[in-house]
Image (spheres, rainbow, N blue to C red):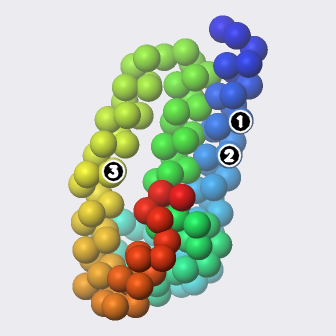
Amino acid sequence: MLVGTLFTGLLLMAAGLAWAAWAAWTLRRAGTPLARRAAPRVLVEEGPYRLGRHPIYLGLLLAAGGLALVLGSLLVMAATLGALWLIARVLVPAEEQQLARTFGGWYRDYAGSVRRWV
Protein backbone atom coordinates (compact mmCIF):
# COMPACT_ATOMS: atom_id res chain seq x y z
CA MET A 1 0.00 0.00 0.00
CA LEU A 2 1.18 3.46 -0.78
CA VAL A 3 2.01 5.64 2.21
CA GLY A 4 -0.13 8.42 0.72
CA THR A 5 -3.17 6.12 0.55
CA LEU A 6 -2.66 5.04 4.16
CA PHE A 7 -2.27 8.65 5.28
CA THR A 8 -5.33 9.76 3.29
CA GLY A 9 -7.40 6.93 4.74
CA LEU A 10 -6.35 7.71 8.30
CA LEU A 11 -7.03 11.39 7.72
CA LEU A 12 -10.52 10.65 6.36
CA MET A 13 -11.25 8.35 9.29
CA ALA A 14 -10.14 10.91 11.87
CA ALA A 15 -11.94 13.80 10.16
CA GLY A 16 -15.13 11.80 9.70
CA LEU A 17 -15.22 10.59 13.30
CA ALA A 18 -14.46 14.09 14.61
CA TRP A 19 -17.22 15.58 12.44
CA ALA A 20 -19.76 12.98 13.60
CA ALA A 21 -18.72 13.42 17.25
CA TRP A 22 -19.10 17.22 16.98
CA ALA A 23 -22.57 16.74 15.50
CA ALA A 24 -23.59 14.25 18.21
CA TRP A 25 -22.27 16.58 20.92
CA THR A 26 -24.23 19.47 19.38
CA LEU A 27 -27.46 17.44 19.47
CA ARG A 28 -26.87 16.34 23.06
CA ARG A 29 -26.08 19.88 24.17
CA ALA A 30 -29.35 21.07 22.60
CA GLY A 31 -31.27 18.39 24.52
CA THR A 32 -32.52 16.39 21.57
CA PRO A 33 -32.07 12.60 21.39
CA LEU A 34 -29.45 10.93 19.20
CA ALA A 35 -31.54 7.84 18.49
CA ARG A 36 -32.80 7.94 14.92
CA ARG A 37 -36.30 6.78 15.81
CA ALA A 38 -36.69 9.10 18.81
CA ALA A 39 -38.83 12.18 18.34
CA PRO A 40 -36.69 15.31 18.00
CA ARG A 41 -37.26 17.91 20.71
CA VAL A 42 -35.33 20.79 19.18
CA LEU A 43 -34.46 21.76 15.63
CA VAL A 44 -30.69 22.13 15.83
CA GLU A 45 -29.26 24.72 13.43
CA GLU A 46 -25.85 25.36 14.99
CA GLY A 47 -22.43 23.75 14.86
CA PRO A 48 -22.06 21.40 11.90
CA TYR A 49 -25.82 21.67 11.29
CA ARG A 50 -25.19 25.18 9.91
CA LEU A 51 -23.24 23.57 7.06
CA GLY A 52 -25.25 20.42 6.35
CA ARG A 53 -28.44 18.80 7.56
CA HIS A 54 -26.99 15.31 8.21
CA PRO A 55 -23.46 15.65 9.60
CA ILE A 56 -23.46 12.43 11.63
CA TYR A 57 -24.21 10.32 8.56
CA LEU A 58 -21.66 12.29 6.55
CA GLY A 59 -18.95 11.84 9.18
CA LEU A 60 -19.54 8.12 9.56
CA LEU A 61 -19.53 7.61 5.78
CA LEU A 62 -16.24 9.52 5.48
CA ALA A 63 -14.75 7.40 8.25
CA ALA A 64 -15.91 4.20 6.55
CA GLY A 65 -14.43 5.34 3.24
CA GLY A 66 -11.17 6.08 5.03
CA LEU A 67 -11.22 2.61 6.57
CA ALA A 68 -11.66 1.12 3.10
CA LEU A 69 -8.55 3.01 1.96
CA VAL A 70 -6.52 1.98 5.01
CA LEU A 71 -7.44 -1.67 4.53
CA GLY A 72 -7.23 -1.49 0.76
CA SER A 73 -10.54 -3.32 0.73
CA LEU A 74 -12.97 -3.19 -2.16
CA LEU A 75 -15.46 -5.06 0.02
CA VAL A 76 -15.41 -2.32 2.68
CA MET A 77 -15.71 0.33 -0.06
CA ALA A 78 -18.68 -1.53 -1.58
CA ALA A 79 -20.32 -1.75 1.85
CA THR A 80 -19.72 1.98 2.35
CA LEU A 81 -21.32 2.77 -1.01
CA GLY A 82 -24.24 0.51 -0.11
CA ALA A 83 -24.64 2.33 3.19
CA LEU A 84 -24.53 5.66 1.33
CA TRP A 85 -27.34 4.48 -0.94
CA LEU A 86 -29.45 3.30 2.02
CA ILE A 87 -28.85 6.49 3.99
CA ALA A 88 -29.50 8.83 1.04
CA ARG A 89 -32.54 7.00 -0.36
CA VAL A 90 -34.26 5.63 2.75
CA LEU A 91 -33.09 7.04 6.08
CA VAL A 92 -32.59 10.72 5.21
CA PRO A 93 -35.96 11.14 3.44
CA ALA A 94 -37.76 9.48 6.37
CA GLU A 95 -35.98 11.68 8.90
CA GLU A 96 -36.65 14.82 6.88
CA GLN A 97 -40.36 13.95 6.71
CA GLN A 98 -40.42 13.51 10.49
CA LEU A 99 -38.66 16.85 11.01
CA ALA A 100 -41.08 18.59 8.64
CA ARG A 101 -44.06 17.09 10.52
CA THR A 102 -42.60 18.09 13.88
CA PHE A 103 -41.29 21.58 13.07
CA GLY A 104 -43.34 22.56 10.01
CA GLY A 105 -42.31 25.76 8.26
CA TRP A 106 -39.35 26.25 10.57
CA TYR A 107 -37.79 23.03 9.24
CA ARG A 108 -38.75 23.81 5.64
CA ASP A 109 -37.01 27.20 5.93
CA TYR A 110 -33.93 25.52 7.42
CA ALA A 111 -33.91 22.82 4.70
CA GLY A 112 -34.24 25.51 2.05
CA SER A 113 -31.18 27.37 3.33
CA VAL A 114 -28.85 24.51 4.38
CA ARG A 115 -27.65 21.83 2.00
CA ARG A 116 -28.38 18.20 2.72
CA TRP A 117 -24.73 17.06 2.89
CA VAL A 118 -22.47 20.18 2.97
From the top left corner, tell me how far across and down residue 88 is, in percent.
Answer: 32, 51
User: Tag 2: residue type?
Assistant: Ala
- The outermost residue toward the front is 113
Residue 97 shows in the view: yes
In what quadrant of the picture does the N terminus appear? top right
Please tell me whether mark 1 sits on a helix, a strand or a loop.
helix
- Residue located 59% across and 73% down the image: 50
Q: Marks 2 and 3, how far apart in space?
A: 19 Å
User: Tag 1: residue type?
Assistant: Leu
User: Tag 3: residue type?
Assistant: Ile
Please tell me whether mark 2 sits on a helix, a strand or a loop.
helix
Horizontally, residue 69 falls left or right of residue 36, namely: right
Marks 2 and 1 close (CB-CB < 8 Å): yes
Marks 2 and 3 close (CB-CB < 8 Å): no
Viewer-proximal residue among 49 and 113: 113
Neighbour tally class for label 1: few under 14, some 14-19, many 20 plus, Cα within 10 Å: some
Q: Marks 2 and 1, how far apart in space?
A: 6 Å
Neighbour tally class for label 3: few under 14, some 14-19, many 20 plus, Cα within 10 Å: some
Residue pointed to by mark 1: 11
Residue pointed to by mark 2: 15
Q: Earlier in the sequence, mark 1 or mark 3?
A: 1
Q: Give the vertical position of 94 relative to 19 (above or below).
A: below
In what quadrant of the picture does the C terminus appear? bottom right
- Residue located 58% across and 23% down the image: 69
Marks 1 and 3 close (CB-CB < 8 Å): no
From the top left corner, tell me how far across and down residue 11 is, in percent.
Answer: 71, 35
Horizontally, residue 6 falls left or right of residue 53, namely: right
Viewer-proximal residue among 112 and 93: 112
Q: Earlier in the sequence, mark 2 or mark 3?
A: 2
From the top left corner, tell me how far across and down residue 91 is, in percent.
Answer: 29, 58
From the top left corner, tell me how far across and down residue 27 is, in percent.
Answer: 55, 75
Residue pointed to by mark 3: 87
